[in-house]
Image (tube, helix red, strand yellow):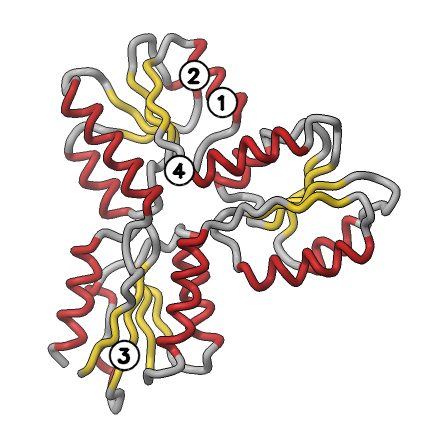
């Protein structure tokens, strides 16, 4: 079977930097207890590898002891949680993706005078919880246009529109155009990562040329799920798997070409394994 593999598949810059910072910390002081505040990235195989090296995930400041090394996840964390961790005497390694950090600081600057934040994203996602914590005024998270309409923004008030860094750029631009017509006091922040746009554009191009798509990555990875959704929107079968072990031969009967892409937190070895499995059919 012919496999068309996306050039953008695999680790993005933010994920690579986060893991490099964690690896460097482990090399410099291997004996110091090391914890990550939430999963450092959204990939179960990577997390399992770090657990083998003694790195475990915690969710709150109450789990931190003085002298612990605490690594802030690539998605970032709420500002108040970081302050609480530092107050407990932890050694903090900030592995927040630079794009996420830029978005956090942009939101803080844009809302410092009390403007209301309208954030396009998944309310339960850790990145979103972190972004919202940097807003000085009110903050509302919406996942689609219906949820935004339910907020009934007041044209007389100032608003700041921003997005989760891995959201769909086309959808965000459509929302921006509509809000600019209704809200005269609107500031729009460009917070969607270029790497996300490039992956999504390439996934669409490949999906238009193949009989089916395979998207490899963690199921709790928002950017991976969106790649799978985009592939499915092209009208071809699309499967989101965490590893090649989940692929089923029966799904590829009578298929000649298959597209292959992966989320920003998917290790290269998992993509290679999926490609080898498909090519062996």
**Residue found at x 69% / y 60%:** 145
**Residue found at x 54% / y 59%:** 169
Horizontal and vertical percent for residue 250?
24, 82
Packing grade of label 1 (10 A; few <14, some 14-19, many >=20) is some
Give whichever of discs 1 and 4 has the lower sequence position.
1
Residue 21 drawn above or below residue 47: above
Badge 4 element: loop
Which residue is denoted by mark 3 in the rendering? 258
**Residue found at x 82% / y 55%:** 182
Badge 3 element: strand
- Answer with left or right where residue 253 lies relative to residue 118: left
Give whichever of discs 3 and 1 has the lower sequence position.
1
Q: Quadrant of residue 86?
A: top left
Instruction: Report the mark closest to the observer, 3 or 4.
Output: 4
Q: Are marks 2 and 1 in contact (CB under 8 Å)?
A: yes
Q: Quadrant of residue 49?
A: top left
In the picture, the disc for residue 217 is none
Residue 259 drawn above or below residue 243: below
Give whichever of discs 3 and 4 has the lower sequence position.
4
Instruction: Report the mark closest to the observer, 4 or 2.
Output: 4
Which residue is denoted by mark 1 in the rendering? 81
Instruction: Report the mark closest to the observer, 1 or 4.
Output: 4
Measure the alpha-carbon separation of dots 1 and 4: 17 Å
* Quarter of the image with the C terminus in it: bottom left
Name the foreground residue: 20 vs 152: 20
């Amino acid at each position: 079977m012919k496999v068309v593999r996306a050039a953008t598949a695999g680790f993005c810059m933010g994920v690579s930097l986060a893991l490099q910072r964690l690896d460097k910390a482990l090399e410099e002081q291997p004996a110091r207890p090391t914890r990550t505040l939430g999963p450092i990235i959204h990939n179960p195989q990577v997390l399992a590898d770090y657990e083998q090296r003694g790195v475990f995930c915690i969710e709150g400041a109450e789990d931190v002891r003085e002298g612990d090394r605490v690594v802030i996840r690539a998605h970032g964390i709420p500002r108040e949680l970081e302050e609480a961790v530092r107050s407990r005497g932890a050694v903090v390694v900030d592995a927040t993706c630079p794009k996420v950090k830029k978005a956090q600081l942009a939101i803080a600057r844009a809302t410092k005078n009390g403007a209301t934040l309208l954030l396009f994203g998944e309310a339960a996602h850790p990145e979103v919880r972190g972004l919202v914590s940097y807003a000085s005024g009110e903050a509302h998270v919406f996942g689609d246009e219906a949820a935004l309409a339910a907020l009934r923004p007041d044209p007389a008030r100032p608003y700041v529109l921003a997005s989760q860094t891995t959201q769909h750029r086309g959808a965000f631009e459509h929302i921006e155009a509509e809000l600019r017509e209704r809200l005269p006091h609107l500031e729009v922040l460009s917070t969607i990562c270029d790497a996300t746009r490039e992956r999504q554009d390439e996934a669409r191009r490949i999906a238009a040329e193949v009989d089916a798509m395979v998207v490899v990555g963690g199921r709790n990875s928002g950017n991976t799920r969106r790649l799978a959704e985009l592939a499915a929107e092209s009208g071809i079968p699309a499967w989101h798997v965490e590893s090649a072990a989940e692929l089923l031969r029966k799904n590829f009967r009578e298929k000649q070409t298959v597209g292959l892409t992966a989320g920003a937190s998917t290790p290269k070895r998992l993509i290679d394994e999926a490609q080898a499995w498909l090519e062996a059919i």
